[in-house]
Amino acid sequence: MAARAHIRSNPPASGVEMRLPWWAVVLPAIAFAVLLVLIAGPGEAQAASGEPAVTHLMERIQQSLSRQG
């Protein structure tokens, strides 16, 4: 007795349209904007010391990388 091969009844569609819910687009955009403001906007501690936020961030990254190696 030979086994039958499974035949696909639906051929693959070439132009499938997928719709995302509104929150799947809006929430990541809001999260990105908030994180960008947190990184770019100087906090009160940086403003008091006069040190730019980007320089402080780069120093922290360099310190954490030097500890691992």
Image (cartoon, rainbow, N blue to C red):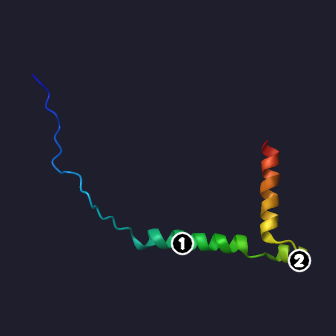
Q: Tag on residue 29? A: 1
Amino acid carrying label 1: it is: Ala
Residue at image position (27%, 61%) is 15
Callout 2 amino acid:
Ala
Q: Is residue 60 left or right of residue 39?
A: right
Please tell me in which quadrant of the rendered image residue 41 appears. Answer: bottom right
Up-down: is 11 above or below 53?
above
**Residue 5 at what x, y percent from top left?**
16, 34
Distance from the alpha carbon under mark 1 to that under mark 2: 31 Å
Image position of 30 (left or right of 35): left
- Furthest residue in direction front, as rendered: 14
Q: Which residue is mark 2?
A: 48
Q: At x 77% / y 68%, what residue is drawn? A: 54
Q: Quadrant of the N terminus?
A: top left
Which secondary structure, mark 1?
Answer: helix
| Mark 2: secondary structure | helix
Please indicate whether residue 29 sits to the left or right of residue 67 in the image.
Answer: left
Which mark, residue 54?
Answer: none
The residue that appears at 53% across and 68% down in the rendered structure is: 28
- Mark 1: give few (<14), some (14-19) or many (20+) Cα within 10 Å: few
Residue 54 position (above or below residue 14): below
Q: Is residue 7 above or below residue 26?
A: above
